[in-house]
Amino acid sequence: METIKTASFEYLMDLAKKNPEEGYTFVLDGTSYQIEDVLEISKIATDHGYIVIY
């Protein structure tokens, strides 16, 4: 049986923490990402198997 993971875009954006110098640190499922723009969050979540709800 496959688990379906969903998350709202707003929730995922709350997980992104602004870095002092530039960009954001985004942690999902224990994996940390350094991103330049919060719009990258949807792709990362999709790659982790999430359905993103807008």
Image: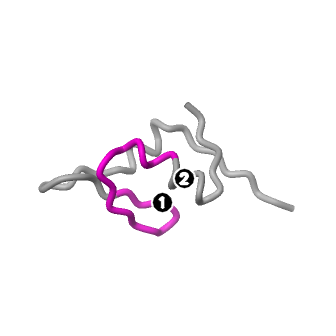
The amino acid pointed to by label 2 is: Ala
Nearest the viewer among 38 and 15 is 38
Which of the 4 image quadrants contains residue 26?
bottom left
Residue 13 placed where, x, y %? 40, 42
Q: Earlier in the sequence, mark 1 or mark 2?
A: 1
Is residue 10 depicted above or below 5 in this figure?
above
Q: Residues within 10 Å of mark 1 (few under 14, many from 20)?
A: some
| Residue holding disc 1 | 28
Residue drawn at x 74%, y 51% is 4
Is residue 2 depicted above or below 8 in this figure?
below
Which quadrant of the rendered structure holds the C terminus? top right
Is residue 10 depicted above or below 43 in this figure?
above
| Residue holding disc 2 | 45
- Residue 6: assigned label: none
Residue 6 lies in the magenta stretch: no
The amino acid pointed to by label 1 is: Leu
User: Which residues make up the magenta segment?
Assistant: 26-42
Residue drawn at x 51%, y 45% is 42
Residue drawn at x 45%, y 36% is 10
Kindly indicate whether the residue at mark 2 contacts the one at mark 1 (C-beta within 8 angstroms): yes
Q: Is residue 31 left or right of residue 21?
A: right
Which quadrant of the rendered structure holds the N terminus? bottom right
Residue 28 placed where, x, y %? 48, 60
Disc 1 to disc 2, how far (Cα)? 8 Å
Residue 21 placed where, x, y %? 12, 56
- The mark tally for this picture is 2
Q: Is residue 52 left or right of residue 38?
A: right
